[in-house]
Each structure stands twice: as C-alpha cells, then as structure tokens.
Image (cartoon, grey):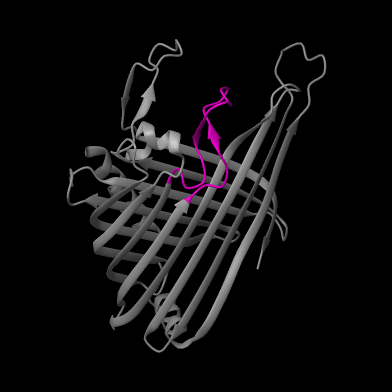
Amino acid sequence: MKKIWIITFMFCCSLTGYAQTTIAEKQLKTQTADTVEGWKNSGSISINASQTSLTNWASGGQSSVALGTMLSLQSQYRKNKGLWENYLDLGYGSLKQGKKSGWMKTDDKIDFTSKFGYKAVKNWYYAGLVNFKTQMAPGYNYPNDSVAISGFLAPGYLLGGLGFDYQSGGSLTAYISPVTLKVTFVRDQELAELGAFGVDAGKKIRSEFGGYIRLQCNKSLMENISILSKLDLFSNYLKNPQNIDVSWENLLSMKVNKYVSASLSTHLLYDDDIDIAVDENDDGIADSYGPRLQFKEVLAVGLSLIF
C-alpha cells in the first residue's frame, strides 16, 4: 500500500512542475478550447529499427535485429457544452538474436479510450468513459516459445464508468469515477483453466465493481521535447478495496527534425489479482507466486510522422 501512495505522490509532484504556466497562457488556452467547435484530429506514427552484426568478434556476442512501430491517433469533437474525446494507441516490437533463434516479441499494445463529457461548471464536466486494452499476438516466456502465456483477449480489459472530468484548459486532465465496472477477459481456454490474470480457474470472465481515477498530463518541456504521463488507479469495492490497481505510463518524445525522432517510454503496473512466478535461485523452478510490480522501458530512435 505504501508503494501505491508513493507512486501517486510522485505523479502529483510531476504534474505540479508541468503545470507552471503564466496566467496569460492559461487564459489563452481556455479561450481557444472553449471557442473552437467541431472535429479536431491528430496523430503520429513512428518506425524504429536497430541492427548489430558480429563476424569473428573475439569479445563474443550475438548479431541482432530489432524492429518496432507505434501508432497514436486522437480525435476530439466539441459542440456547445459537449466534449467527445477518442484515443487509440497501437504498438508492436520484435527482436531476433543470432541465426538460429526466431523472432521474439518485445512490445504489443492495443489501447482505446472514448470519453464523453457535458459541461457542468467552469472546468468540470459530467462524464462517462470506456477503455479497452489487450494485445495482438501470443506472448511467450522466452526462451520457451512452445507454450503461450498470453494472447489476443488473453488478457483483455474493458472498463466503463460514470463520474466527473476536470479540464484545466492547459496540460492537465483528471477523470474521477465513483461508479466503475471493470471486466477481465481470458479467451484462451488453457490459460482460463489455470486461473490466469485474476480470473477464477475454469472461467473466462471476471467482473469487478469499484472506483476509478485517471490523471493525464501532456506538456511541452521545451522546443521539440514533450512528455505525456498517464496514471490510472482502480479500487475494487467488493474485494480488498485497499489493494489499488496501478497503471502509470510515461512517454518522453524528442524531435530531431521533421522525420527523425527519439522516444523513451516507461510503463509501471501493479495488479493485486495477478500472480507472478518468482525463481529466487535461478534453477528454472518457481519458488513462489504473488503480485509484483511490473515495469517496462523502451528507448527508440527512428522515423516519425506527425499529422
């Protein structure tokens, strides 16, 4: 529990730093957001690659090829007091080491969010949100690539809630939903029989009812450098509400020129219902199972197009 509060505190501190704009800038952003109606669409696509070739290399090592791509789409519709926002993030990456090994998945992401709000007072909206997350291809516990440990809709997460949305008129948004339904899918029968991803053994669906908070900050730090930070918190009212599920994503984007960019992304996860095997003595046998902090980091340099 202490870890969860530390993470939340760190996020809030970062938001405080990002939100330091002048009063004039805030007024200008608010005025622009409130007066521009209709559709506003944007997006970006990036392709990243790296390659290492070794021939008679005395120090050892393996030749490798890594490929990755990311697609991000945003669509907003504003009319009178209504605001409809849609976001789609797709990502996939793979790695091949040596001549004999096959391609190994390093990244796989489908993340769609749709949020509708109706203005209540000042920067607050009555709002409803739907979020769907899963992956495209099977995942394996490499080097064992014979048994899949994940796949499309294994797991899949569908979350829907009603609440309130705060739009600062600048870089910060906060969605608070005291009434939220979270559904976990495990489409693969073998994984379902094992009770993977918190679903009861033999079942393919698990439903939770609780409270949900999403904090998002999209800030330009300086010319050609920006950061996007998203923190999702969910508490299941019906079972161990003190054990909060956490998803914290950060994307630092750096634009070199019109087509070349670099990015650093991190994703921290904690789900009290997901048991992760731990091999403490590296003998290939799991010594214990339990919830653990999950962390992923991706550094990429490649071609990008913003539209």
Residue 291: percent from left, percent from top: 31, 32
Q: Quadrant of residue 20?
A: bottom left
Does 30 appear in magenta?
Answer: no
Q: Residue at x 69, y 24 (%)?
A: 101
Q: Front-most of 160 and 264?
A: 160
Residue 11: percent from left, percent from top: 34, 51
Q: Quadrant of residue 174?
A: bottom left
Is 64 placed above or below 224 here?
above
Does 153 appear in magenta?
Answer: yes
Q: Which residues fall within the magenta stretch?
A: 134-155
Q: Front-most of 294 and 129?
A: 129
Residue 153: percent from left, percent from top: 47, 47
Q: Taking the image as drawn, is residue 19 in sight?
A: no
In this rendering, position of residue 176 left or right of residue 156: left
Is 31 placed above or below 57 here?
below
Is 55 placed above or below 3 here?
above
Q: Residue at x 30, y 64 (%)?
A: 161
Q: Residue at x 66, y 45 (%)?
A: 301
Q: Taking the image as drawn, is residue 69 in sight?
A: yes
Q: Front-most of 9 and 76?
A: 76
